């Protein structure tokens, strides 16, 4: 069950005058993936082919095992496709997935049902109908993959590629950080890492909005996050063994300092963007005035 956390770094918490506001928290990508239960249903349905296959003739057994394996593959592709689509949706600037997993999942499911229909009816119209029906149901249940890039109009593709790679690496560090804290076996520590990840992702979204900010934010996405990941891994091992309260306070203070630093950098990048816009507007107005005098 979701819990609400308060404090000086929560959106509703108190804030010391002169300090930057806490960033708006963003739910981690894995919490925003909808429909994964449907992939589990497809996975469980594979056993309808696997178990009966062992009582059939050798040829039918091979087809039954193949059909079950294809359904398992279809379920895995559907789950990964949902995650890829959720990541694409969450970002302001994103490229379409390189491989259409949801479409491949529908094709794989159709192939599995074709094999099952062939076992029951031989080579006839029924296996084809089963395949078409299965593929259609998969597309209806899971939808299609994103087929176009998003937010890249008027932006240098080279810059967007650099940003995409940098954000992907930063997300990997956050994932490693979350995996490391699981060793501590403490839900409150896991929630603390989620709050830090939300703060870091607010900077990710800022850099994605304007790829020119990557140079100014690169050390935050690499050096600082790598340091937070390493510190979290060492703290998790220590906490699991000794429950050292001083180590916990020091680790929490480190994350708080990093959150403040990330928020300040994000605010500075936003202000720089506003300054650039003001300059562009001022130059355009001067040109309009000069043109009207001619």
Image (spheres, helix red, strand yellow):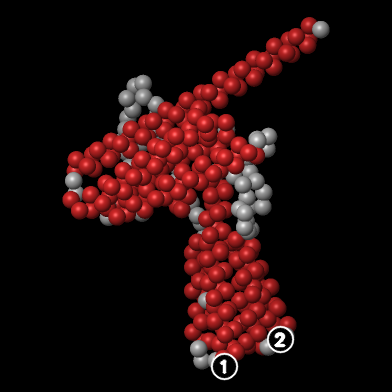
Helix, strand, or loop for circle 2?
Answer: loop
Q: On the image, numbered disc 2 is attached to which residue? A: 123
* Labels 2 and 1 touching (C-beta < 8 A): no
What is the quadrant of the N terminus in the image? bottom left
Q: Can residue 284 be seen in this view?
A: yes
Left/right of residue 67 with respect to residue 265 in the rendered view? right
Relative vertical location of residue 37 with respect to residue 29 in this rendering, above or below: below
Residue at screen point 44% across, 39% down:
222
Spatial CA distance of label 2 from label 1 is 17 Å
Residue at screen point 67% across, 52% down:
147
Residue depth check, mark 2 versus mark 1: number of the one nearer the observer: 1
Residue at screen point 30% across, 52% down:
187
Residue lying furthest top:
293
Q: On the image, numbered disc 1 is attached to which residue? A: 57
What is the quadrant of the C terminus in the image? top right
Q: Is residue 140 visible?
A: no
Relative vertical location of residue 65 with respect to residue 291 in this rendering, above or below: below
Residue at screen point 19% across, 43% down:
245
The image quadrant of residue 129 is bottom right
Residue 102 position within the rendered picture, expressed as x and y whole percent measured from the top left: 60, 61
The image quadrant of residue 66 is bottom right
Q: Are there few (<14), some (14-19), or many (20+) residues within 10 Å of tag 2?
A: few
Residue 55 position within the rendered picture, expressed as x and y whole percent measured from the top left: 51, 92
Left/right of residue 1 with respect to residue 132 in the rendered view? left
């Amino acid at each position: 069950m979701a819990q609400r956390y308060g404090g000086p770094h929560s959106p509703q918490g108190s804030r010391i005058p002169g300090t930057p506001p806490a960033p708006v928290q963003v739910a981690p990508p894995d919490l925003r993936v909808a429909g994964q239960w449907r992939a589990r249903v497809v996975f469980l349905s594979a056993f309808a082919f696997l178990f009966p296959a062992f009582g059939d003739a050798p040829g039918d057994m091979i087809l039954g095992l193949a059909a079950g394996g294809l359904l398992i593959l279809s379920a895995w592709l559907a789950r990964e496709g949902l995650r890829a689509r959720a990541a694409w949706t969450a970002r302001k600037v994103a490229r379409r997935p390189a491989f259409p997993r949801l479409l491949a999942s529908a094709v794989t499911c159709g192939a599995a049902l074709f094999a099952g229909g062939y076992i029951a009816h031989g080579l006839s119209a029924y296996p084809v109908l089963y395949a078409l029906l299965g593929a259609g149901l998969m597309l209806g249940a899971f939808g299609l993959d994103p087929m176009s890039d998003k937010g890249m109009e008027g932006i240098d593709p080279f810059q967007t590629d650099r940003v995409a790679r940098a954000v992907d690496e930063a997300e990997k560090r956050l994932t490693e950080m979350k995996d490391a804290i699981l060793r501590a076996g403490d839900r409150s520590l896991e929630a603390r890492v989620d709050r830090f990840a939300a703060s870091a992702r607010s900077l990710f979204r800022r850099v994605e909005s304007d790829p020119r900010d990557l140079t100014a934010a690169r050390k935050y996405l690499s050096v600082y996050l790598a340091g937070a990941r390493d510190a979290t891994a060492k703290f998790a091992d220590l906490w699991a063994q000794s429950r050292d309260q001083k180590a916990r306070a020091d680790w929490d203070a480190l994350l708080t300092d990093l959150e403040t630093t990330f928020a300040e950098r994000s605010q500075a990048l936003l202000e720089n963007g506003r300054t650039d816009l003001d300059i562009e507007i001022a130059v355009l107005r001067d040109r309009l005035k000069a043109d009207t005098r001619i």
